[in-house]
Amino acid sequence: MTIDWDTVRCFIEVAEKRSLMGAAAALGMSNATLGRKIDALESAVGLQLILRGPGGITLTEEGGEMLVLAKAGGNHLLQMERLAFSLKSDRHALPIRISATEIMVSAILAPNLPTLSAQHPGLIVDLIMSTELADLNRREADIAIRLMRPKSEGLIARRLPEITSCLYASPAYLKGRSPDALNLHEEKLVGLNDRFGDIPELRWMKKQGLQQSLSAQTSSVYALLEMAKSGEAIAMVPDFLARSHGLIAIASPPIPARKPWIVFHRDNRRNPQIKAVGAWITKCCRDSFGLD
């Protein structure tokens, strides 16, 4: 019986995602290809490991026991991959994968790439726009930037400068009215939807009783920015973005600041490229937020 790591990795992904489609998307392969790999694994071990149903994938009892061993063995192989990456990065130009949110990638990191290139010629970064916490153990990313501190073992998290926000409108929306004298319950507002769960911005809107004043919702902060700029409505926008687009702050109760974290695997804590990119990200944030 021969079982290769790629097939085991597919089994682990299917077991954790509980979905062939979700696992296939994560692995970058078709459903049919992934299905054949699972079939081949079951044939190799002579056991049925998963059950396919309308509600998704469930593990058989045997599949559950096999998953425990597969993940244990997989962790050792992943450690080898991370070590190989760390060793090779001292000798070859490997891309540093950075997983971050829409605003972090587009408004903060991308505009500052010339600085990184000037300071570290030959260093390559791969900017991955994602709201999901990339699996650093599997090197889906080398560095992740997230708005909450992850609790996974083996990860190092360091605080980045806070992101402050306020309600903003354009001069076209205000039409000469004072931004300090508006009754927000009588104004037209746009805000984030619940795509990312019960986030602080939504809780603030609910606490202020402003949900019913929303004329539009979106999962994109950039979309909110554009709606505010167009004069369509008042929008909650990060201060650093609003300042650069000529928007006017509207008086309102304080909005909780978001506390981003830069996260990387502890195996990479001495990697010079990871350290260089981490320092660059921190400086990008401080410069963008107007901090000394």
Image (spheres, rainbow, N blue to C red):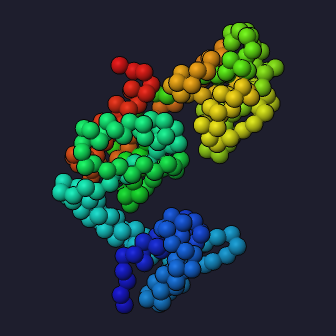
In the rendered image, residue 92, in percent from the top left (x then y), is placed at: 21, 58
Closer to the camera in the image, 207 or 136: 136
Q: Looking at the image, can residue 254 be seen?
A: yes
In the picture, which quadrant includes the N terminus? bottom left
Q: Which quarter of the figure has residue 182?
A: top right
Closer to the camera in the image, 28 or 23: 28
In the rendered image, residue 222, in percent from the top left (x then y), is placed at: 60, 37
In the rendered image, residue 197, in percent from the top left (x then y), is placed at: 63, 43
The residue under the point 64% across, 33% down is 226
Q: How many marks?
A: 0
The residue under the point 60% across, 28% down is 237
Q: Which quarter of the figure has residue 150?
A: top left
Q: Which quarter of the figure has residue 261?
A: top left
In the rendered image, residue 292, in percent from the top left (x then y), is placed at: 35, 19
The residue under the point 60% across, 78% down is 51
83 above or below 219?
below
Residue situated furthest left in the rendering: 91
Horizontal relation, residue 122 to residue 202: left or right = left
27 above or below 61?
above
Q: Looking at the image, can residue 239 be seen?
A: no
The residue under the point 39% across, 27% down is 286
Horizontal relation, residue 39 to residue 283: left or right = right
